[in-house]
Amino acid sequence: MTAVTGPVTLRVRASRIPALPIFVLLVVVLAGRYSPGRAGIGGVAIPDLRVLGVITAIALAAIGLTRRPAPTAARRPEGWLIAATLLFLYQVASALWAPEQARTGEKTLDVALLAVLTGAFYLLARRDPAQAIRWTFGFFLAAALLFAAGALLVSGPGAQGRYAAFGGGPNIFVRIEILGIISAIALHKFTGRLVPLLAIAPLAAMAVLSGSRGGLVAGAVVALGALVRARGRIPARPAAVILGALAVVGALVTVAAPAAVAALRIRFVEQTIQQGYSSGRTEIWRSAARLATAHPLFGSGLDGYYGLAGRTQGVEYPHDYVLAIAAEGGLAGLVLLGTAILLWIGTVRRPGLPAETSMAVAAAVFVGLDTLFSGDNYDARLAWVFAALAAAAAVHPPATAAVRAAVTRRARVASEP
């Protein structure tokens, strides 16, 4: 192992994980429920593409790992993963008492894939978490830029003046754009290069142009937390690059797209602040809370919200991951979710962890907060994936004495005036 530029950042000379299965899994995670019909292929009986992708990735991983050395054995606190797996199993089992109108087959597959993706990313990444996390952030930075270009050049603004790309809605689009911003910052921290930071301004502009209030609030909370944690120790050059690029891109958007700026003013000022418009979220959350109160211990069962309430209201899911767990899994589901989160926090908050862990934590927290405003069980997959990556980096065998000494020297030099 050798140390590279950046705060407590480690790099392995020869990766102990194959790249191809990681990228196949990342494509599966990014694509979501991308069906053949959505891709413009009609009348073709093709199995769920997510299942094909996961099977392919697992097969490639099994082949690739046999040619690479296993990591050093070490005690790993994996209670969070056990609790998460029990949660997923419980959700699948709750289909037994779900209402007749619930879409239990479809939702069982969603939860099963969520469990497989979480476990697969963790088990693969823990062999070489630094490399896996760098690949992941590089992938999402490229994806965010691609989606931004697609929104500008292909999709354009929707009926409300909101931007999205490739058939996904604005709420998915903003999630990808903000993950791209986190990825740019992560790659800068890992490499010390300023070039990734240039992507922040256009990605931030596109995130705002999505008009997704929940995603922007989640991103703002994570950004504020990062600033508080930095305590004013932000290097001048990166800050200058980011602020300069934001000023240039902001001016360009204001001059070149006045209609988009006007649409944003209507959505954020008139609709949100003056009219209190919430896209029906408050009523949806109230109905989910009533369902949780009516079935307090074990919930209404998998997809019970849709079967008992959403179906008659034209609403697919509660648009809040925690409320969905409460309504469909009851107190038992909430206890399992809370246990998984608390054990995960204990895993990733240990002292002396690498920068890879902190950046993966930021991504996991952002998506987790965003799921409180939009998405169903499967839409929470990115939060679980980044949580798995952060935990894998946190439980990786400790660095050698030489690496620790180099990190200490770098920290001492950075702190000097």
Image (spheres, rainbow, N blue to C red):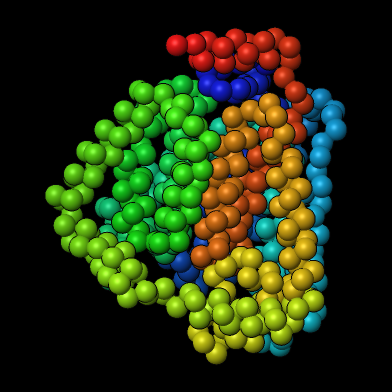
Q: Residue at x 23, y 45 (%)?
A: 250
Residue 144 in view in this figure: yes
Left/right placement of residue 142 relative to residue 359 reads: left
Question: Residue 66's quadrant in the figure?
Answer: top right
Instruction: Name the quadrant containing residue 272.
Output: bottom left
Residue 288 drawn above or below residue 71 = below
Quadrant in which the N terminus is drawn: top right
Where 62 falls versus 165 (above or below)?
above
For the point 75% across and 53% down, the residue is 340
x, y percentage for residue 220?
Answer: 44, 50
- Taking depth in this image into account, of 34 and 136 the one nearest to the observer is 136
Figure quadrant of the C terminus? top left
Q: Nearer the viewer, residue 2 or 357?
A: 357
- 325 shown above or below 133: below
Total residue callouts: 0
Residue at image coords 43%, 41% = 181
Q: Residue 192 vs residue 82: left or right?
A: left
Residue 124 visible, this orientation: no
Q: Who is closer to the viewer here, 341 or 402? A: 341
